[in-house]
Amino acid sequence: MSGVTLSNIKKAFGPVEVIHDVNISIEQGEFVVFVGPSGCGKSTLLRMIAGLEETTSGVIDIEGQDVTHQEAARRGVSMVFQSYALYPHLTVFDNMAFSLQIARRPKDEIRAKVEEAARILQLDQHLDRKPSQLSGGQRQRVAIGRAIVRQPKVFLFDEPLSNLDAELRVQMRMEISRLHNQIGATMIYVTHDQVEAMTLADKIVVLKSGVVQQIGSPLDLYDNPDNQFVAGFIGSPK
Ligand code: ADP
Ligand code: MG
């Protein structure tokens, strides 16, 4: 089944086009990494999929439904923000419950969903703590938990680990991989870090200046880079 399909997507800010005719097909359950240097358009693509930014032209389809002009809240996507976006005055439980409370879901449903997310993320012992009482890794897991409770079809990650130190980045990378295996949702992960891309992705989309350079598995890109840019970026000898 198709997860997310981008067809002929363009985006201009005023007169400046920054995304040029992008086509990407993502299968349901795939882990896809958008990689490319700063300013190449990764966040803009993600924000258009999330519905936080209008497309200038083209079609976005999620699991067979055209969502191009649909409001963000109805698309079934959740964006994972960096851990510093937690509410400092709320407990872990309330941070994770917040979007469900806003949506006026029943209390017992909220509790069940938050507790399940906490189990998946090994936060069950910390539900009453405030973010300031957590480690960096635990805070990042709460940020992921806020997305999980909404049971999205698609998870969107925009450089979620860029604030963490190197050791914690490696650990969180493995946790995100485990999460993907466990819940099987479609995940789109943006990074400028080649190593992160190569270790996490089923499929990598290499971007440069708003143009897709190549789409393939990590091995495809390493063994058969389409051009110098991909070769240089992925680190293979072409
Ligand atoms: P990345 O996430 O890959 O670093 P972005 O998607 O943030 O890149 O940005 C892509 C291009 O679009 C950049 O040239 C950036 O300056 C431009 N851009 C992003 N958002 C805006 C905006 N709101 N207004 C004008 N230009 C923007
Ligand atoms: Mg960005």
Image (cartoon, rainbow, N blue to C red):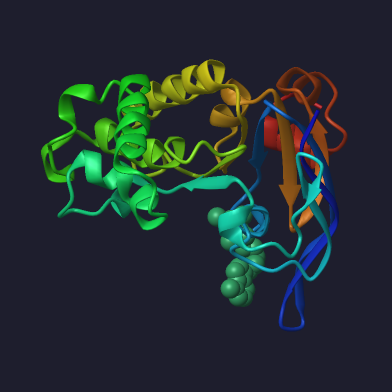
Image coordinates of residue 52 in percent, x first then y, are 58, 63
Q: Residue at x 49, y 44 (%)?
A: 159
Q: Who is closer to the viewer here, 21 or 75? A: 75
Q: Quadrant of ligand 1?
A: bottom right
Q: Who is closer to the viewer here, 134 or 71? A: 71
Q: Residue at x 35, y 44 (%)?
A: 106
Q: Residue at x 37, y 32 (%)?
A: 113
| Image quadrant where residue 3 sits | top right
Placement of 141 over or under 162, stated as above or below: above
Image coordinates of residue 38 in percent, x first then y, are 58, 54
| Image quadrant where residue 136 sits | top left
Q: Who is closer to the viewer here, 112 or 169? A: 112
Relative placement, left or right, of 149 versus 232 is left
Q: Quadrant of the C terminus?
A: top right
Placement of 150 over or under 70, stated as above or below: above
Q: Which residue is the extreme one toward the bottom? A: 14
Image coordinates of residue 191 in percent, x first then y, are 56, 42
Relative placement, left or right, of 146 versus 8 is left
Image coordinates of residue 78 in percent, x first then y, are 52, 46
Q: Quadrant of the N terminus?
A: top right
